[in-house]
Image (cartoon, helix red, strand yellow):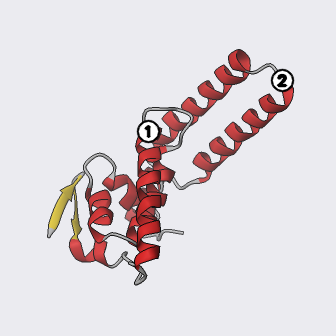
Amino acid sequence: MNSDNGGQVVSATSVSDQLRVSRSATARTIYLVLGFIFLGIGIAGFYLPVLPGTINLLVAAYFFSMSSERMFRWMMTNKAFGQQLQDYRAGLGIPRNIKLVAVASIVVSVTLTVTLAMSNPWPRAGMVLFGLVGVWFVLTRPTREVELQRLAAGGSLD
């Protein structure tokens, strides 16, 4: 089964190769519940600037890879975010425009929160630190366009 996703074809065997479904029914159930929790947070993260979307979807995909082939396959071939997950898992990183939106969202939401909703300096400092860690995380991930250029020039993913 092949699914066209963002101009690239994902084969069922490449998706199946990433599965590590647990043999324990209890573990599968726990992983499945965690997968749905992180899927919900990840989808919310695309609409709420304080929640990171992609990283939570990656965590959800990880849990689904250990609990449900059907949900894992659905995530990896999803038209809205499947290509992002595949690229990230392949080491291609995050597209430049998504990095820009993520950093801008973090900066705006943290700035508004600490200036309008917080008066105590300790929680303010914690929120700023939280925002800085988020910006650092986004900026230190590989940039998809740079990695594709490196591959086109005969390089490899680091």
Q: Position of residue 75 (x, y in %)?
A: 32, 58
Pointers 2 and 1 in contact (C-beta within 8 Å): no
Position of residue 54 relative to residue 115, above or below, is below
Give the residue at the far front of this rendering: 26
Q: Position of residue 121 (x, y in %)?
A: 85, 26
Check residue 152 in the rendering and tell me which mark sits there, or answer none.
Answer: none
Give the residue at the far left of this rendering: 1
As helix, strand or loop, the secondary structure at mark 2 comes to loop
Q: How many marks?
A: 2
Q: Which residue is mark 1?
A: 44
As helix, strand or loop, the secondary structure at mark 1 comes to helix
**Residue drawn at x 36%, y 76% as measured from the top left:** 19
Kindly identify the amino acid type of the residue bearing the numbered disc 2.
Asn
Q: Nearer the viewer, residue 135 or 21?
A: 21
Q: Nearer the viewer, residue 120 or 23?
A: 23
Q: Give the quarter of the figure containing the C terminus.
A: bottom right
Kindly identify the amino acid type of the residue bearing the numbered disc 1.
Ala
**Residue drawn at x 73%, y 34% as measured from the top left:** 127
Q: Give the quarter of the figure containing the N terminus.
A: bottom left
Q: Position of residue 29 (x, y in %)?
A: 41, 69
Q: Which residue is mark 2?
A: 120
For label 1, the crowd category at 10 Å Cα-Cα, with few meaning under 14, some 14 to 19 and many 20 or more, is some
Q: Nearer the viewer, residue 42 or 23?
A: 23
Position of residue 29 relative to residue 122, above or below, is below
Q: Position of residue 67 (x, y in %)?
A: 38, 71
Image-based side of 123 in relation to 73, left or right: right
